[in-house]
Amino acid sequence: MSLVSNWVGRPWLPYFLMVTTLAVLSCSQDRQYENYGDIRTSPGGISLIDPEEHGGGYGRTSCLVCHNLELNLHRSEGSSFSNAEQLNDTIRENGGSTFCLKCHGANGTD
Ligand code: HEC
Ligand code: HEC
């Protein structure tokens, strides 16, 4: 039996196949991590001193509006943190966004 004659009387079949294919594909995708390469090699190192390297975020203090501790921060491949969860706990216990500035510089807010 050909594929086309299989569809006769089953008009929903192509849609069913399409939806299941999309569902399977989207499940097989990796969670998105924040990854900007090795940020230690930029002129300021991990300090945010250049508006160019921090599109959208430069001059702002509420880091956690855009960066997500629960999901992906400090978990990129090649990160120097073998235990991102430990660092992220320390950040949570020490005032969140304000603690980011200790390592990442004033981010144009000084
Ligand atoms: C309005 C959203 C927003 C806010 C607020 C924000 N960021 Fe970002 N941040 C971004 C985006 C978008 C990028 C990716 C920028 C790019 O690739 O140009 C980024 C990238 C970065 C990077 C990597 C930079 C690099 O060298 O490639 C660091 C580190 C960072 N943010 C830290 C912070 C810290 C610390 C704060 C708070 C002081 C903060 N961000 C606030 C949106 C934001
Ligand atoms: C103890 C120092 C320290 C603190 C505190 C810290 N960071 Fe980082 N962060 C780093 C270092 C070092 C890197 C360089 C990449 C790596 O080794 O993971 C980095 C990398 C990043 C990156 C690049 C992508 C990634 O996820 O690796 C972003 C974005 C970032 N930090 C945002 C933040 C934000 C937002 C906060 C506060 C909620 C924060 N950092 C607090 C040290 C710190």
Image: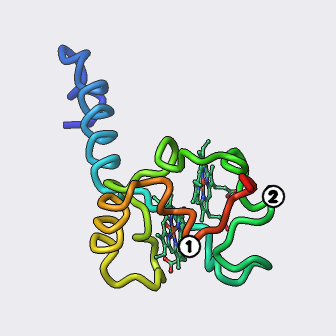
Residue at horizontal 41%, vertical 54%?
96
Q: Quadrant location of the N terminus?
A: top left
Q: Is mark 2 within 8 Å of ligand 1?
A: yes
Residue at horizontal 71%, vertical 84%?
41
Residue 78 located left or right of residue 25? right
Residue 33 located left or right of residue 25? right
Residue 31 position in % (x across, y down): 36, 57
Mark pair 1, 2: CA separation = 19 Å
Amino acid type of the residue that numbered disc 1 sits on in the rendered structure: Cys
**Closer to the camera in the image, 14 or 60:** 60
Residue 74 located left or right of residue 63? left
Amino acid type of the residue that numbered disc 2 sits on in the rendered structure: Glu
Residue at horizontal 59%, vertical 48%?
61
Residue 26 position in % (x across, y down): 34, 46
Q: Residues within 10 Å of mark 2 (few under 14, many from 20)?
A: few
Tally of marks: 2
Q: Is mark 1 within 8 Å of ligand 2?
A: yes
Residue 57 position in % (x across, y down): 66, 48
Q: Residues within 10 Å of mark 1 (few under 14, many from 20)?
A: few
Occupied quadrant, residue 45 = bottom right
Q: Are marks 1 and 2 in contact (CB under 8 Å)?
A: no
User: Ligand 1 is found in which quarter of the picture?
Assistant: bottom right
Give the residue number, with chain letter if any, for mark 2: 52
Q: Earlier in the sequence, mark 1 or mark 2?
A: 2
Residue 109 position in % (x across, y down): 71, 52
* Secondary element at image label 2: helix
**Closer to the camera in the image, 94 or 36:** 94
Give the residue number, with chain letter if any, for mark 1: 103
Q: Quadrant location of the C terminus?
A: bottom right
Can residue 25 be seen in this snapshot? yes
